Image (cartoon, coloured by chain):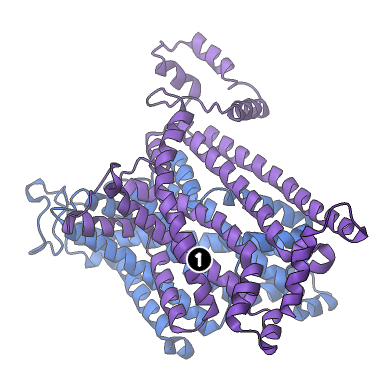
Amino acid sequence: MISKTRKSTEEKPAAPKPAAPKPAARKPAKNRYVLLRALSYIPVLFGVTVLVFVLMRAAPGDAAYMLLTEHGKDVTRENLAQTRTELLLDAPVWKQYAAWVAAAAKLDFGRSAINGREALPQFVAHLAYTVRLALPAIAVMLFIALPCGVIAAARAGGAFDAAARAATVLILSIPGFCAGLALLYLFGVKLALLPTFGAGGWRHMILPAATLAAGAGAGYARFIRAAVLEQLSADYIKAGLARGVRPGRLVNRAALRQALPAIVTSVSMTLGLLLGGSAVIETVFSWPGVGKFLVDAVSKRDYAVVQCCVLLFGVFFVTLNFAAEIISMLLDPKTRRGKGDAA
Amino acid sequence: MKKAFANPLFTAGFIISFLLSAVALFGGILAPNDPLAVDFRNTLAPPGGAFPLGTDDLGRCVLSRLLCGAGATLGATLTVEIFTLTFGLFAGLIAGYFGKAADGVILIVLDVLLAFPSIILALVIAGVLGPGLFNLILALCAVWWVGHARMARSLARSARGRTFVLAAKACGSGSFSIITRKILPHILPQMIVYSALDASAVIAGISSLSFIGLGVRPPAPEWGASLNDARAYMETNPQMLIAAIVCLLLAVAGFQLMGEGLRDVLAVRLPHIGIRKRRRGDALGKRDL
């Protein structure tokens, strides 16, 4: 039964495109899905830019005044009025928004009010540090959390599941910065094994990377467990068991395959957790990544930098989620089979 | 109630939360010293004597500051949780029950807010509003209701097709009465469990942001801010750091245990809300019952 279903799902995408009415009938459902998703992606992207725009306009301070004083010019009524016109501050809001989006689309996010350099290159430079912390976390997610989640789901209720659940609840409920500070004290001060702040060699990386990886790994393992468990309670598993298929084979071949879309989307959700966590954890360890960059910009009220970071984060995640959905749809045997079968 | 206290998780969580609430309410009375009294002749004193946990860099009593800071941290958490539960229920019920255009609009708002990691958006909003506990609460509320709304929406959606709702509809009940009398009581246990579990995340959020310096204004005590104060003196006065961490962990554990216990006692299962499931139901025009 199971092998039969699998066979049919695997054969279908391989079917040649210009074929009998059946695949032709399938395609529109799939295209319609992608189109609908793309259409709902646009208003969200629009909303993200509006939100950032509104937040930045709501920030206190006169942009024209700040620009003039930044360039060391005397502020007179005339040049203030002129700068305001140049900056479109007197224009209708929609015009300001359009100009702002046009500039952002050209990757012009303005200059930092603190050091006068462009925001984007600084963001990119700091991003390299965050990526360095994120890579070990992603490795932990894929090589430790993923198998642990699957095993916990396959042996749900067993000793491994209980231990894994206790560990994930423990890790997830401890605020990241508390864990970071505790590790810092233990390994940096008490045992004096590792450096306590800044970025340098690999030794500087261990503590922040471990803190981030623990959080991301625990979150991911929980997603995976839930996703696989959901599949294991499905009827096709019961049917397989009743027919005497080995449980291990059912998990590996059938349930994992069905859970694959959820496993992919979980990566994008966990990356969100990771980046959110990095803002605080990088501050704890004085690690010069984008998180600390943003925190510093917020506390110095450097709005050009804040807007650059937040807009890029937002666009990045909306795009990531969109991509994850499309990938998971392509991986999902149910949607692949078309609308009729999925219902 | 008897059944609830038979559950060890709930009982442990309840006791911890109860004790912490007592500290939050009566911290000022319990504190051995004035939490704001600065004494430059007695800075960074080791634990002992009149100062059980020593003094900080301005000679203020660490213990008193933690006891008085409980009110700020836990009070803010409670405020955020009550507001987000109310607002999330409101938005989620409307989106989940009416569907169609109302659902579409609310979903877009939710998706926009979900586009950012919540702590980062809260950080930026709090930064724009300026430091202060009230602004911090406002910023967190603006971001945190999304989770409650999604949960309420998903629960309301699945309740919509249940027979008791259909029966009420058949008897001629209006939408308002169906929502408030049928669906709300039906989904409330799940929402309460969700809120209790979520409270520990809110504590983490509040203390993280005050740790960064966006919470209470400096002289006032707060746990996240205490952690930040303690950080610089980790080598000489580790008890400052350890005490603040223990306070935060206790609070987080209390809510977490209470939530987990309540989940067992009320026998509720929270739906696993993934991105894909919700969207595919929408895209193909199906109800995710």
How many marks the image carries: the answer is: 1
User: Looking at the rendering, which quadrant does residue A302 occupy?
Assistant: top left
Colour for chain B in the figure: blue
x and y, in percent, of residue A59 in the image = 49, 34
Q: Is residue B130 above or below residue A215?
A: above
Q: Nearer the viewer, residue B136 or A87?
A: A87
State left or right for residue A77 relative to residue A98. Answer: left
Q: Which residue is more in the foreground, A266 or A81?
A: A266
Q: Identify which amino acid the numbered label 1 is placed on.
A: Leu
Q: Is residue A290 left or right of residue A17?
A: left
Which chain is mark 1 on?
A: A
Whether residue B94 appears in this view of the structure is no
Q: Quadrant of the C terminus of chain B?
A: bottom right
SS for tag 1? Answer: helix
Specify the colour of chain A.
purple
Residue found at the very far right of the displayed protein = A21
Left or right: where does residue A20 sit relative to residue A170? Answer: right
Residue drawn at x 58%, y 22% is: A89
Q: Tell me residue A276's x, y (percent).
A: 46, 51
Residue at the image position 70 percent from the left and 44 percent from the top: A43
Q: Is residue B220 above or below residue B164?
A: above
Residue B257 vertical position relative to residue A314 in the rendered view, above or below: below
User: Where does residue A131 sit, x and y in percent of width and height?
Assistant: 44, 45
Q: Which residue is mark 1?
A: A146
The answer to whether residue B85 is left or right of residue B79 is right
Which is nearer the eye, A237 or A192? A237
Q: In terms of image quadrants, where is residue A186?
A: bottom left
Q: Residue at x 62, y 74 (%)?
A: A230
